[in-house]
Every structure is written in structure tokens, then in C-alpha cells.
Image (cartoon, helix red, strand yellow):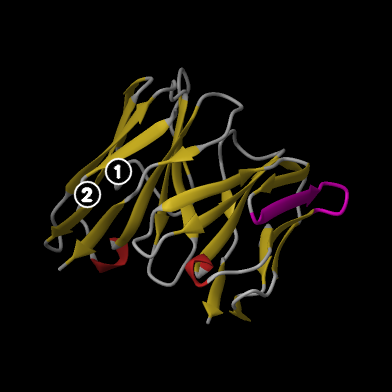
């Protein structure tokens, strides 16, 4: 079956430091990868979309300078939260899909910023 | 504006009662997914339902594109059904793979 793994599951970083999170798709080709964030007491919002052979598209309020994303092949993606502050805390989800099929989500990386 | 309106925001049921969760959307639709969010935050995909009705055990999802709505019906609720339910849509005019999530319904089933 199709599975998406995310690492780490939980992480704590000091304010002003950076942390990298990874997303691994197994059992299907991740032709597109979407990164979402759920801030405390809120629903999920899209950070950026990465589709194979296309430029990564960032949503309003999110930038490549703050959330650089790598999508080097059809099974892996990573995103870094640079210079993290309190407002960056939350659950980061990676959603991957193979073209028009259903999007599969990983378990998320929960970021705490001290 | 808000593309996805989910209702109710919260719901308390007696065990055995049925629940009807609604998701209304203001844009044309490519796909609709329903998720259960575990207490730890991870999402469990319940239905991928662009149109029509789908069944899975005690759960039924119905998406009516013309009326721009999707519903999740839980029959004979159990205490283990408690948690947050989210709908997410991929609009026809939005970027490929962009899911817009509803605000969620917090369901509590009491014995």
C-alpha cells in the first residue's frame, strides 16, 4: 500500500535556530508533495506545493527564504524551517500523491520552539 | 474568502446516536477528502470522494457537486469515534494538489 513517513515525529528547537524535516513516500511515486502546517487551535494551511518538473509554489505568507524545500526524486522531500520563532510552532504535515490520485499524508512533525 | 465551511464546529452525542457532519464549499471541485485527526495530530484518511456516495463500515460520505456540499454520516456512534473530523477540498481552479481544509468538527461521544 501507499505510505508516507515523516521524520522526526517531534522536535524542539531554540528560538532563532533552524530545523529540517523529511518526508518519504513508499509504495507510490510522489509526483507532487505538499507541505502543510497546523498552528495551535487552527486548521491546516498550505505552505508550498512541489510538483515534479515544475517550480515549487509557495502560498501567501510563506517564502522559500523561510521554508526552503527540496524534492530531489519521486520518493523524498525535505523542508527546513529557518530561524524558527514561536509563531512557527505547530504540526507540519507532508502530503504526497501520484498525479490525480488521492493525497496521502504522513504522521507529521510536531515543532516546539523555546 | 473562506472556500470551505465545515459544520457544526462541535458536537456531543450519546453513544448509539447518529452524526451528520457537513462541508460546504464555494468553488468548483476536483476532489473532496474526509479525515479523522488523531489526538497526536496525524490524519487518517476516511474517504476520497469527488462525487456520489461511498460507504465504509458505519461511515458514509456523500458529495453533491451541484449543491457544493459534502457530508460525513456516522451511524451508531461509539465513544472511540470521538475526535476531530476534517474535510479538505481540491478546487478545480486551484493549483494541482492544493487542499483547502475546513475548520474541523470536534465530536464527543459520551457513554
Q: Quadrant of residue A25?
A: top left
Q: Are marks 1 and 2 in contact (CB under 8 Å)?
A: yes
Horizontal side of residue A14 vs A67, given as left or right: left
**Magenta highlight range:** B58-68
Q: With A88 as the anchor, is A60 left or right in this view?
A: right
The answer to whether tags 1 and 2 share a subunit is: yes
User: Would residue B62 be counted in the magenta stretch?
Assistant: yes
- Which residue is labeled 1 in the image? A65
- Which of label 1 and label 2 is nearer to you? 2
Q: Give coordinates of residue B17: x percent, y percent.
A: 68, 75
Tell me the subunit letter for badge 2. A
The chain carrying label 1 is: A
Farthest right residue in view: B66
Which quadrant of the structure image shows residue A5?
top left
User: How far is mark 1 from mark 2, CA to CA?
Assistant: 8 Å
The residue labelled by disc 2 is A82
- Residue count near mark 2 (Cα–Cα under 10 Å), binned few <14, some 14–19, many ≥20: some
Q: Earlier in the sequence, mark 1 or mark 2?
A: 1
Residue at (47% x, 50% y) in the render: B44
A90 to B98, vertically: above or below: below
Give the quarter of the figure containing the N terminus of chain B.
Answer: bottom right
Amino acid at each position: 500500500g501507499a505510505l508516507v513517513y515523516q521524520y522526526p515525529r517531534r522536535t524542539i528547537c531554540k528560538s532563532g535556530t533552524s530545523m529540517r524535516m523529511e518526508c518519504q513516500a513508499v509504495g507510490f511515486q510522489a509526483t507532487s508533495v505538499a507541505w502543510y502546517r497546523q498552528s495551535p487551535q487552527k486548521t491546516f494551511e498550505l505552505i508550498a506545493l512541489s510538483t515534479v518538473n515544475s517550480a515549487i509554489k509557495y502560498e501567501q505568507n510563506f517564502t522559500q527564504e523561510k521554508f526552503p524545500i527540496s524534492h530531489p526524486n519521486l520518493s523524498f522531500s525535505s523542508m527546513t524551517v529557518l530561524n524558527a520563532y514561536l509563531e512557527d510552532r505547530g504540526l507540519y504535515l507532508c502530503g504526497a500523491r501520484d498525479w490525480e490520485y488521492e493525497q496521502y499524508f504522513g504522521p507529521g512533525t510536531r515543532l516546539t520552539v523555546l | 474568502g473562506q472556500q470551505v465551511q465545515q459544520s457544526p464546529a462541535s458536537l456531543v452525542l450519546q453513544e448509539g446516536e447518529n452524526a451528520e457532519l457537513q462541508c460546504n464549499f464555494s468553488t468548483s471541485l476536483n476532489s473532496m477528502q474526509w479525515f479523522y485527526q488523531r489526538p497526536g495530530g496525524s490524519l487518517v484518511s476516511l474517504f476520497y470522494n469527488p462525487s456520489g456516495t461511498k460507504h465504509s463500515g458505519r461511515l458514509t460520505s456523500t458529495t453533491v457537486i451541484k449543491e457544493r456540499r459534502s457530508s460525513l454520516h456516522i451511524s451508531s456512534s461509539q465513544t472511540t469515534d470521538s475526535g476531530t473530523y476534517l474535510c479538505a477540498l481540491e478546487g478545480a481552479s486551484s493549483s494541482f494538489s492544493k487542499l483547502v481544509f475546513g475548520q474541523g468538527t470536534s465530536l464527543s461521544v459520551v457513554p
